[in-house]
Image (spheres, grey):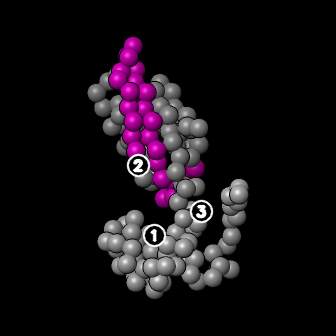
Amino acid sequence: MERRFLLVEAGVLPDVFLKVLHAKELLASGEAKNVSAAAKMADISRSAFYKYKDSIFSAESGRELVTINATLKDETGALHALLAGISDAGASIVTINQSTPEDGTALVDVTVRTGGMRMEFDELLHVLAAQRTVVDVRRGI
């Protein structure tokens, strides 16, 4: 059977779904050390958690992740400047992957969480592109 996904406003869902999501968040943050503790803290049974855990997801968390692909000059401080620009915009850095410099440049992929940004993403790209050590910068696919 093909899986089908729906985006539903949380207020119309039965409480158990929101409690399962809360339990998953408690586990992910480390506040709860195991499923039993998370279920107890969320006020649901372990069986309810296991029944729905693979079917309940927060639409907010995935939507906020964006990858920035940048080509930087092979100069001291280039990566630091890029990361500082991202951080100054209020984005939270999730992962960084950098290639070995070749022909004077290095490719860098930075995945960021955009939920706390104080500017639009395109504006961030414009700010980063203006940095002296940035050869190219764009939104990842």
* Residue labelled with disc 2: 93
Residue 123 percent location from the top left of the image: 56, 43
Disc on res. 59: 3
* Residue labelled with disc 1: 24
Q: CA distance from mark 3 to mark 2?
A: 19 Å
Residue range of the region highlighted in magenta in the rendering: 94-120
Amino acid type shown at disc 1: Lys
Query: Callout 1 environment at 10 Å: few (<14), some (14 to 19), or many (20+)?
Result: many
Task: Report the quarter where the N terminus lies.
Answer: bottom right
Q: Nearer the viewer, residue 90 or 114?
A: 114
- Precedes in sequence: disc 1 or disc 3: 1
Disc on res. 136: none
Task: Report the quarter where the C terminus lies.
Answer: top right
Hey, which residue is sitting farthest bottom in the picture?
A: 43
The image quadrant that residue 7 belongs to is bottom right
| Label 1 element class | helix
Q: Residue at x 55, y 34 (%)?
A: 138
Residue 25 percent location from the top left of the image: 44, 69
Amino acid type shown at disc 2: Ile
